[in-house]
Amino acid sequence: MMKDDDWKLEFRKVWDRGVAAWKAGRRSARTMFAPEDVAFLAGIGCTPQELFDFVDDSLGWDDLDFDTVLAVTAIRRAYFLEVMHGQPTERVIPMSTLPAKSAAGGMGIAWAPASHRQGAHQGSAARWTRISCTAGGG
């Protein structure tokens, strides 16, 4: 079993491989990560699409750095392990069923979530609903 902080070292290696893949032109979640990386990510509650988005935002838009990605992933991992008991959600909302990203909500803020929480009132039974960010909905 992996020690509590060992996952961070492996996550950094997967991140670095993702960065190298992006620079080599493999710029999709399906092509960026090897099967063993996908398996590792699943074990911490992270999808290849989520990490791809982080890498793409970091390199393509200079939006964030690895330390920020690690901090967000640590929070998501804790929720995944402690609340979801290491079980991924089965609920996925395809992007095609959601309003256009340019649509502004009631507060005038353009809509663009990567995922959102469902069932917070259900305590430990709360589950995440994952929103698919790919054209094919997967």
Image: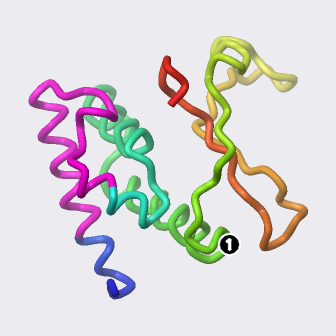
As for residue 23 lying within the magenta part, the answer is yes
Snapshot colouring: rainbow
User: Which of the two residues, 49 or 12, is positioned nearer the viewer here?
Assistant: 49
In which quadrant of the rendered image does the N terminus lie? bottom left
* 111 vs 34: above or below: above
Residue at 23% across / 57% down in the picture?
36
Task: Name the spot of residue 67 as percent of width and height, x first.
Answer: 34, 59
As for residue 117 lying within the magenta part, the answer is no
Residue at 54% across / 65% down in the picture?
75
Q: Residues within 10 Å of mark 1 (few under 14, many from 20)?
A: some
Looking at the rendered structure, the secondary structure element under dot 1 is loop
- Left or right: 55, with 90 as reference point: left
* 138 vs 6: above or below: above
User: Which of the two residues, 42 or 66, is positioned nearer the viewer here?
Assistant: 42
- Left or right: 27, with 102 as reference point: left
Residue picked out by circle 1 = 83
- Left or right: 97, with 27 as reference point: right
Q: Mostly what secondary structure, the magenta segment?
A: helix
Residue at 56% across / 32% down in the picture?
132
User: Which of the two residues, 7 or 60, is positioned nearer the viewer here?
Assistant: 7
Task: Name the spot of residue 32 as percent of width and height, x first.
Answer: 23, 37
Numbered-mark total: 1
* 76 vs 4: above or below: above
Specify the amino acid type for callout 1: Val
- Left or right: 96, with 59 as reference point: right
Task: Name the spot of residue 89 as percent of width and height, x first.
Answer: 64, 53
Residue at 15% across / 37% down in the picture?
21
Specify start and end residues of the magenta stretch as a single range: 10-38
* 123 vs 108: above or below: below
Q: Quadrant of residue 127?
A: bottom right
Task: Name the spot of residue 117 as percent of width and height, x first.
Answer: 73, 50
